[in-house]
């Protein structure tokens, strides 16, 4: 069920959403080929809706003010037909979704909304943009804040829309990083002629080559031992470092055991791999949030972000309601400590005044109920 179960709170949230949609136009590419789904009591109460134009879509928003609004990544000849087979599939956008940090990190996690987790997700999102543009050479990457915890990445070219699920799976695995990057021959139980990326390798392999090369070039005997080389092996490796680096340039990594290089690779992968929601990428009929629409769990806008401006994007950029003056009275359902949309320390069942942005945020999260409508100044 939707977090906003309190009837008056729900009515208030929907009223404010209605005001927003009365003053903001949404635009969906190829709108007449998309299936749409909407929700008030949950993320998708119903689907199989279709619109001929963006004007029709915006008229729907102004009349109904849904709390959740999604559209299909797929394009169809008959998008409102049912069952699904009758829609006639015409291809699907390539979409990546990230809404949580790829790896754990030490911090004081906020269960209601963690600003620190969002900061990590944004950093991972910047890596995704780099991979899509630099490694894959994709043009026209469209990025939007999800309206809650993460970001969506859309690719809509005709060539992209024809990608198979297997190809899409390979792309998600590339973002995470391959399990192994070395090939070793075997001779009497020992690794021989170990091969890996060279100076001329591209993509993920080149990134690792640069990382490993820089480490070996500067590593002391002690640092080599920390990575798994022991005793005389580390000392001999250090003395032959110049030759090792030359062989690495050629893709030859045989002067240390594979487990030594694997340890360095594991460290690199942990720092550089990005975990996306593979289900979103592989589901060719996925419904995903409409860019620019409001998110019913936060009251924030799913802002479109230019890829190059992603480093500058801040959560405040998604706030569309007043975050300054305290104008509404709410009743917290739990003890609340928040840094966003404003700094709040609230006690359970103790009425308090908050800004409109914070009040809507807490009501959408189901953590507070409305006590007093906006003051009539």
Image: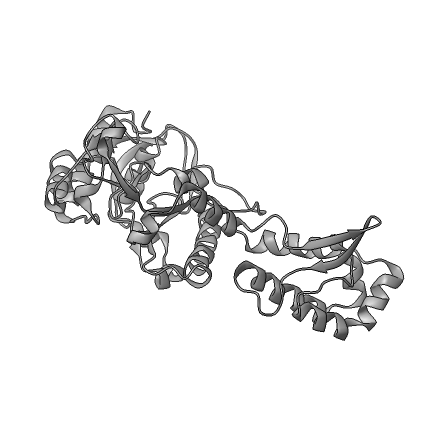
Look at the image and tell me in which quarter the C terminus lies.
top left
Q: Residue furthest right?
A: 232
Left or right position of 124 against 219: left
Q: Nearer the viewer, residue 208 or 293?
A: 208
Residue 12 position, x and y percent, is 20, 33
Residue 372 in view here: no
Q: Quadrant of residue 75?
A: top left
Residue 50 in view here: yes
Q: Nearer the viewer, residue 151 or 191?
A: 191
Q: Quadrant of residue 55?
A: top left
Residue at left 60%, top 51%? Answer: 270
Residue at left 59%, top 47%? Answer: 106
Residue 39 position, x and y percent, is 25, 31
Count of numbered marks: 0
Q: Nearer the viewer, residue 132 or 98?
A: 132
Look at the image and tell me in which quarter the N terminus lies.
top left
Residue at left 63%, top 54%? Answer: 181
Residue 306 position, x and y percent, is 32, 60
Residue 77 position, x and y percent, is 19, 38
Q: Quadrant of residue 218?
A: bottom right
Coloring applied to the structure: one colour
Q: In the rendered view, would you say 199 is above or below 168?
A: below
Left or right position of 250 against 281: right
Q: In the rendered view, would you say 211 is above or below 145?
A: below
């Amino acid at each position: 069920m939707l977090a906003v179960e309190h009837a008056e709170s729900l009515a208030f949230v929907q009223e404010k959403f209605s005001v927003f949609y009365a003053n903001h136009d949404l635009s969906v590419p190829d709108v007449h080929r998309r299936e749409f789904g909407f929700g008030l009591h949950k993320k998708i109460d119903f689907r199989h809706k279709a619109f001929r134009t963006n004007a029709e879509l915006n008229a729907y928003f102004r009349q109904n003010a849904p709390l959740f609004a999604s559209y299909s990544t797929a394009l169809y000849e008959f998008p409102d037909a049912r069952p699904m087979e009758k829609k006639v599939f015409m291809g699907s956008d390539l979409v990546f979704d990230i809404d949580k940090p790829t790896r754990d990190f030490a911090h004081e996690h906020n269960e209601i909304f963690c600003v620190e987790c969002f900061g990590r997700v944004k950093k991972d999102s910047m890596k995704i943009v780099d991979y899509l543009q630099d490694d894959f050479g994709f043009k026209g990457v469209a990025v939007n804040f999800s309206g809650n915890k993460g970001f969506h990445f859309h690719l809509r070219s005709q060539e992209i829309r024809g990608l198979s699920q297997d190809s899409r799976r390979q792309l998600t695995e590339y973002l995470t990083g391959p399990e192994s990057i070395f090939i070793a021959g075997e001779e009497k139980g020992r690794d021989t002629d170990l091969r890996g990326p060279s100076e001329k390798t591209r993509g993920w392999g080149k990134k690792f080559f640069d990382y490993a090369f820089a480490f070996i070039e500067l590593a002391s005997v002690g640092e080599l031992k920390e990575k798994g080389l022991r005793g005389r092996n580390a000392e001999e490796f250090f003395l032959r470092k110049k030759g090792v680096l030359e062989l690495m340039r050629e893709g030859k990594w045989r002067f240390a055991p594979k487990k030594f290089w694997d340890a360095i690779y594991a460290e690199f992968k942990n720092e550089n791999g990005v975990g996306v929601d593979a289900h979103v990428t592989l589901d060719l009929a996925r419904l995903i949030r409409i860019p620019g629409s409001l998110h019913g769990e936060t009251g924030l806008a799913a802002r479109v972000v230019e890829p190059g401006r992603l480093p500058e994007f801040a959560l405040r950029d998604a706030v569309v309601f007043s975050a300054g003056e305290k104008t509404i009275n709410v009743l917290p359902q739990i003890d609340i400590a928040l840094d966003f949309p404003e700094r709040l320390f609230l006690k359970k069942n103790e009425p308090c005044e908050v800004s409109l942005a914070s009040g809507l945020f807490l009501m959408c999260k189901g953590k507070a109920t409305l006590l007093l409508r906006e003051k009539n100044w």
